[in-house]
Structure formats: structure tokens, C-alpha cells
Amino acid sequence: MEGERKTALINLAGINKVPISLLVGTEDNTCPYSRAVETASIIGEAVVHFESIEGYNHLSFASANDEWFVKLVISQLQITPIEEHIIAQ
């Protein structure tokens, strides 16, 4: 189909060198909440934070600049001891 491209699948279970923080909108139809939960489960220990954000959809993140959201993002950029362990592997 024109405008569509197929790429090789990525083995999500193989992600283990970087800590991952998932911020997930509960009303996201592009990447449904259930898919995000499943993806976090597949990735496993590398997911060091999973945040459910009530009422957010996929586009909500494009304009999310509320103080609480910015603080949340900044907090996830800090490395914790468990993340240091993941990075060292």
C-alpha cells in the first residue's frame, strides 16, 4: 500500500542496556493502554517506571507542558541505583 512501509520486528525482550520509563495514556487509541502494559511485560526489568496517565491519548503528549508533567519527565531522567545496575550489564 502506498505510504506504508514494513520493517523488521525488534526483539523487545532483548532490551536490557538502558532503563526505560513508560508514560502511558489511558485513552490512547494509537498505542492502546493494554498494548503498553503488554510491551512493558515483554521488556521486563529494563522498565523501571510505568506511569498511567488518566484521560491522556496519543496526541496529549504532543502538547503536554503542565508543570506536573514536566516534573514527571525530569524525574525520570534521573538515574537510580537499579538503573545503574541495568546500564552496567
Image (cartoon, rainbow, N blue to C red):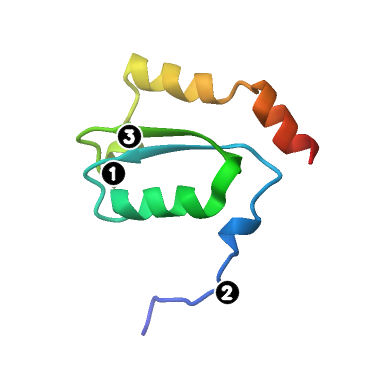
At mark 1, the secondary structure is helix
Q: Which residue is mark 1?
A: 59
Disc 2 or disc 3, which is closer to the eye? Answer: 3
Q: Are marks 1 and 3 in contact (CB under 8 Å)?
A: no
Q: Which residue is mark 2?
A: 8
Look at the picture and state if 10 lies above or below 65. Answer: below
Residue visible at 29% across and 56% down in the picture? 30
Look at the picture and state if 33 lies above or below 72. Answer: below
Q: Residue 89 at x, y = what percent?
A: 79, 41
| Number of numbered labels in the structure image | 3
At mark 3, the secondary structure is strand
Side of 30 relative to 71 (left or right): left
Q: CA distance from mark 1 to mark 3?
A: 15 Å
Whichever of labels 2 and 1 marks the residue nearer the N terminus, that label is 2
Q: CA distance from mark 2 to mark 1?
A: 26 Å
| Relative depth, front residue between 49 and 63 | 49
Whichever of labels 2 and 3 marks the residue nearer the N terminus, that label is 2
Q: Which residue is mark 3?
A: 52
Disc 2 or disc 1, which is closer to the eye? Answer: 2
At label 2, the amino acid type is Ala
At label 1, the amino acid type is Leu
Q: Are marks 2 and 1 in contact (CB under 8 Å)?
A: no
